[in-house]
Amino acid sequence: MFKSPNMQFYGTGTIGEKGQIVIPAKARETLKINPGDEFIFFGHKSIIHIVKASELNSILDRMTQKFAKNMAGIKEKIKHARK
C-alpha cells in the first residue's frame, strides 16, 4: 500500500459533528502544520489526499518535470523504433 519510503503513519482521527478532522500532533509537528494553514482535498474512491495549498505549486512543478522527462524518453524510443 505504501509505495513511497517517505510515507509515515501518524495515527487516526475522528470527524466531528461539524465535519472537522483533528490531525494527530505528531503529524502537525513533523509536517509543520499550523493553525490557519489552508489545504486542498483530492479524492479517489475511498481515499482522501490532503495537500497544503502552499505546497501545491511545487508538487505540480515536480510532477510536470517528471512527466516531461518520461515523455522525452518515450519519444526517443518511438524515434528509434521507426528506423
Image: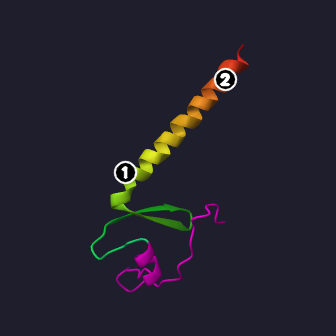
Residue 7, image x, y percentages: 57, 67
Please name whichever residue, 47 or 74, is drawn nearer the observer in this view of the structure.
74
At label 2, the amino acid type is: Ile
Look at the magenta stretch and give its main secondary structure: loop
Residue 35, image x, y percentages: 29, 77
Mark identifier at residue 14: none
Mark identifier at residue 57: 1
Q: Is residue 21 magenta?
A: yes
**Highlighted range, magenta:** 1-30
User: Which residue is at a point 67% across and 23% down the rendered structure image?
Assistant: 78
Give the residue at mark 2: 78
Mark 1, Cα crowd under 10 Å, few <14 / some 14-19 / many 20+, is few
Quarter of the image that includes the C terminus? top right
Q: Earlier in the sequence, mark 2 or mark 1?
A: 1
Q: Is residue 83 magenta?
A: no
Quarter of the image that includes the N terminus? bottom right
Residue 73, image x, y percentages: 62, 31
State which quadrant residue 17 falls in.
bottom left
